[in-house]
Image (spheres, rainbow, N blue to C red):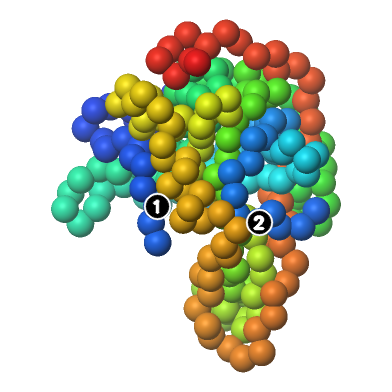
Amino acid sequence: MSALLSGLTVDNSIQNETDSVGGGGVLESGVYKSTITMAFLQKSKGGALGLNLHFKNEDGREYRQTLWVTSGDAKGNKNYYENKQGEKRYLPGFLHADAICLLTVGQGLASMDTEDKVVSVYSPEAGAEVPTQVPVLMDLLGQQIGVGLQKQVVDKRQKADDGSYQPTGETREENEVDKIFRAEDGFTVAELRANAEEAAFIHTWKEKFEGKTRDRTSKQGSGAQAGAPQRPAATGQASGGAAKPRQSLFAS
C-alpha cells in the first residue's frame, strides 16, 4: 500500500457511490472506452492529493484529468466531507479514482501500491515540463475503462489584488470526468455492489449528457468568447504496468 494513500478513509459510515444524473481539442460529451497510459499522484501547493491520469480513447485521441482525492491542508487532507446534516460524503474526485481502480484491477484506491518513476511534469515556475520523480500507480497502466466525460464552458479567471480569482469576461472549454463505467460491459460500481443483472445507468447517462455542452460560466463580463482548453497539469510516461488479474466482485 502506498504511504500517500494510507491515510484515505474507507468505511461504512460514509455514503458510497450512487448512480445519478445531476444537473487535441476538447472532446464532446460522451462515454469513451479508454486506455490508461499514465497514472501518478501529486500534491497541490495547498496540500490536496491529486491522481493525474492520461487516457487514450479508441480513436487515438488523448486527454488528461486530475482527480482531487483529498482536500487540502486547511480542511484536513480528507477524502470526504460532511454536509449540513452532518452526513459524510466522499469527494467526487475520490469516488471517480476509486471506481477506476475497482473496475480495472479489482481493489480500491486506498489499497493501491505505487512505484517512484521519473516522468515529465509541468512546472509553473519553469513554465515547461520538467523530469520529476512521482509515485506512479503502475497497476493502472494499460488498463481499459469507460469514462463518462462532460464538455463544459467555464470562466477564464485571473488573480485579483485580494488574492481571489475572478472571471475575466472570457470563457474556455474543458472536459470533466462525470462517471466511470467498466469498459467491457458498462457496469458502474453502484450496480455491481447492488448485484444488478444488467448495466442500465450507462444508457441513462448517455440520454442525459451525450453530445451536450454544460454551461458553467458566471455570465460576468461582456463579449465572452470560448478560449483554449486549460493546460494539463502534467505529462509523462513510465514503463511497465502489466495488468493484474482481478479478484473481486468488480471483476467481469
Q: Nearer the viewer, residue 8 or 109?
A: 109
Q: Nearer the viewer, residue 35 or 199?
A: 199
Above or below 74: residue 34:
above
To which quarter of the image does residue 91 belong?
Answer: top left
Can the viewer see residue 48?
no
Where in the figure is residue 39, as x and y percent of width and height? Answer: 65, 31
Residue at 76% from the left image edge and 57% from the top image edge: 25
Within-10-Å neighbours for mark 2: few <14, some 14–19, many 20+: some
In the figure, is residue 78 to the left or right of 187? Answer: left
Where in the figure is residue 4, as x and y percent of width and height? Answer: 51, 28
* Disc marking residue 28: 2
Which residue type carries mark 1? Val
In the figure, is residue 95 to the left or right of 87? Answer: right
Q: Which residue is mark 1?
A: 21
Q: Nearer the viewer, residue 223 or 39?
A: 223
Which residue type carries mark 2? Glu
